[in-house]
Amino acid sequence: MGFEMKQEKDVLGLIPSKTQGKACSSNSSSVNSPHNKNKKKKKDNKKKVVMTWRRKKTDSRAEEITAVRQLLLTCKEVFSKGGPGVVPSEDKIQQLRGVLENMKPEDVGLTPTMPFFRPIPGPSDGSSPRITYLPLHECEQFSIAIFCLPPSGAIPLHNHPGMTVFSKLLFGTMHIKSYDWVVDAPLRDPKTRLAKLKMDSTLTAPCNTSILYPEDGGNMHRFTAKTACAVLDVLGPPYCNAEGRHCTYFLEFPLDKFSLEEDDVLRGQVEKEGRAWLQERDDNPEDHNVVGALYGGPKVED
């Protein structure tokens, strides 16, 4: 915060302007008399200068931009020319990553003690504890949302067709396992493909923002909460069933699940680590227990 020092009379607007001073000197010759000069000098000597502070004008608009508002504005810029399969430029990716890296739980009004993060069992035995989904913004170009996971909460293995996805762990410890498709590998059947492991790690906040792309970076991934966790997700573009971008869940099988005797290409993959069969599921996983709730943090839009 900057300040300027001003004389009290100047601040109060009591000192005449230069123009006014010139008019007085031209209209009265007595002003220049020795007697008046001596009187003026004596008055000046007795004059006390009082200093006061005046707050500099600041850009109040800039001060009003919250972290979540800045995230929205950045997403609008980054995904302005986006679409299915369109990956933003590296500069734009780093721009959005930089904003997400600075996001904190309080920026979206969350704390680990909130009811969202209590381990409430699902409707059936063995199902994942309930996960809460908080939508912040959605348009044709992108969506912003938060997943609130209690301990042991899990989001099953699923894909992001044609999307670039940014995931920021706001707090907690989470295990992430992700895959990409093996390029040019033949299908075992119409719903089963060979995939390569991209990530199999446990992350604890604060940590780097994860980014996945339409064809690489771990487009299929699974989240499992070790502790209460909050994940801020940005999807560009968002899921859209009408445009064929629906969320598909997968079952995971080891390589030796299927015979490779007649497939030379796949036989070469057996010796490699991190290969698995991913098979599309016909329905949503029974242990996928997600409910929606209203976002109650700082305003995202005006």
Image: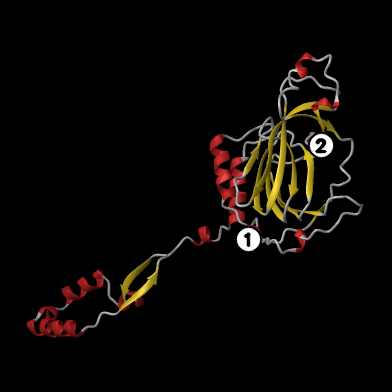
Q: Nearer the viewer, residue 158 or 62?
A: 158
Task: State the residue at coordinates (58%, 47%).
Answer: 74
- N-terminal of the pair, mark 2 or mark 1, is 1
Where residue 287 appears, x then y in whole percent?
A: 86, 47
Task: State the residue at coordinates (64%, 42%).
Answer: 210
Task: Bin the neighbour count of mark 2 within 10 Å (Cα to Cα): few under 14, some 14-19, many 20 and up.
Answer: some
Task: State the residue at coordinates (78%, 48%).
Answer: 154
Q: Is residue 255 above or below residue 295?
A: above
Q: Amino acid at mark 2?
A: Thr
Q: CA distance from mark 2 to mark 1?
A: 32 Å
Q: Is residue 9 visible?
A: yes
Residue 300: image quadrant is bottom right
Q: Amino acid at mark 1?
A: Glu
Where residue 203 appears, x then y in whole percent?
A: 65, 47
Judge from the rendering whether residue 11 lies leftward or rightward of residue 63; answer left or right: left
Which SS class for mark 1? helix
- The residue that disc 2 covers is 248
Quick one: quadrant of the C terminus?
bottom right
Where residue 227 appears, x then y in whole percent?
A: 72, 55
Instruction: Check residue 106 in the rendering and tell me which mark sits there, or answer none.
Output: 1
